[in-house]
Amino acid sequence: MDAPTERNLIMTMGRLNARALNSHPELLQAGPTGKIDPTYFQSTMEYRQRVGQQLDNVLRFACTLRSFQLACAVLDAIVMFKIGCMDAHSETELKWFQNFMEDKYGKEGTPKLILEDTYLGVPTEEPSKDKEENKTEAEKKEEEKNKLVQLIAQSRQVTTTDDKMSLEMQITRQHAEAFTKEKLALCQRQGIPPQIGMQAYRESWFIIVRAYKLNEDGSRMSNWDGAMGGSNPNHFEVLKGNKHAIFEMLTEDTIASFEKEFVGSDVSDRKVIVGWPFVISNVAQKSGKVKIHLPPPDVPGKYEFSVTIKSQEFLCGVEEFKLVVDIAQGVKKKKEENQEEDKEGKKDK
C-alpha cells in the first residue's frame, strides 16, 4: 500500500472513531503538555472538507443513477463522517446523540422536522411576501381572490400531459428556538457580534421521492416500468444514449451491477424519481414551505408517491410520508398531434 493511500485510510478511521478518540484520557492529557502535532487538527479539518465534497459528489451520482440504496448509504456516510461514529443506525450511537443534544439544548433541542400541509398535484402559485401591514385594501382583496384561484387549481386533477406536478409541504423545525438561544449565547461568550456568528450556520436535509403504480385494490403494482414525463423509463439507456460522463468513469462490471438493481419485480422500491437537497442557513428559521416539481406518469391511474427525508447533519430519525394521486388521461397538445400526423403520413408514403 502506498503512503498517500495508507494516510487516507488512517485519517478516515480516525474520523469515524472521532467521538471515542476526542474524549480519550490520553488525548486530553496530551494537549496541555504539547504532545500533539500542531498540524494534526488542521490536517484533519482539511481532510474532512475534501471528503465532504467527495461525498456530496457521490450523492449526486447516486441520484443520477436513480439508486435509492446508494443515496441512503451516502447520506448515512455523510452523517457518520460529521459526527465521528461507525454506524448511523446503532441504537447506542442514536441514544448517545439524543442525550447529548438534550443536555446541550434541552428537551426541544433534538433535531426534528414536523411535516404539515403535504400536497401533491397541480402546482400552486407562490403567496405574496409583502407584509400584511403594508398591504392596501385592494391588495388584500386581490390576495383573497388568488387564494380562491389556488384552491380551484388544487382541486383540478393532474393529467398525463401536464408539464409537471408539484410536491409541497410545510416544514417546521422543532429545534429552531433551542438552537438559536445556544448560538446567541456562544456568540456572547466569544465576543462575536450575533449578526456575524449567525451567518456561519448551515443545516442540510435531503428529500428522496419514489413512485408506485397502484392496482385497483390499492396494492402496489410489481411490474410497473416507471414511465414518467414522456421519457424513456430505462434511465440507463438514456444516459448511454446521451454519452453521459458517468459511463466514461465506470467499468462495464460496475455498470452491469447498477443495471441489475433495476431488473425484476419491485423496481419502484429501489428507484429514485427525484433527489432534492434543502439547506437552512438561518438558525432562527422556524418554518418554511418546500416545493418540488415532479414529472407526471405517462399512464392514467392511481399512484403512490413515497417521500423520505434524511438529515445530512444529525443522527436522528428518518421522516417519511406517502401521498396518493389519481392521474387522468390528458389531452394531447396540438404540436404533438401534428408531429404524430406527420409520422403517419411518412409511413403511408
Image (cartoon, rainbow, N blue to C red):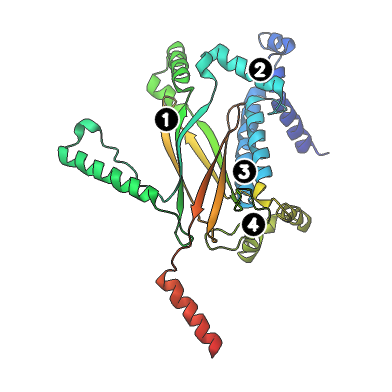
Q: Position of residue 307 (x, y in %)?
A: 56, 41
Question: What mark, if any, has residue 224 been given in the picture?
Answer: 4
Which secondary structure, mark 2? helix
Q: Identify which residue is drawn at 49% across, 60% down.
A: 160
Q: Earlier in the sequence, mark 2 or mark 4?
A: 2
Determine the CA span between mark 1 and mark 3: 26 Å
> In the displayed image of the protein, which residue is found farthest to the left?
137
Determine the CA span between mark 3 and mark 2: 27 Å
Which secondary structure, mark 4? loop
Question: What mark, if any, has residue 306 been given in the picture?
Answer: none
Determine the CA span between mark 2 and mark 1: 27 Å
Q: Nearer the viewer, mark 3 or mark 2?
A: 2
Q: Quadrant of residue 255?
A: bottom right
Give the total number of marks visible in the rendering.
4
Query: In the image, is residue 94 above or below residue 294?
Result: above
Q: Nearer the viewer, residue 349 or 150?
A: 150
Q: Position of residue 301 (x, y in %)?
A: 54, 56
Q: Nearer the viewer, mark 2 or mark 4?
A: 4
Report which residue position mark 2 lands on.
96
> In the displayed image of the protein, which residue is found farthest to the right?
1
- Taking the image as shown, residue 309 lies to the left or right of residue 152, namely right
Determine the CA span between mark 4 and mark 3: 26 Å
Report which residue position mark 1 lands on.
287
Q: Earlier in the sequence, mark 4 or mark 3?
A: 3
Q: Quadrant of residue 321?
A: top right
Q: Earlier in the sequence, mark 1 or mark 3?
A: 3
Q: Position of residue 270 (x, y in %)?
A: 67, 47
Q: Quadrant of the N terminus?
A: top right
Circles 2 and 4, Cβ within 8 Å, touching? The answer is no
Q: Identify which residue is drawn at 44% across, 13% down.
A: 185
Report which residue position mark 3 lands on.
59
Amino acid type of disc 2? Answer: Trp
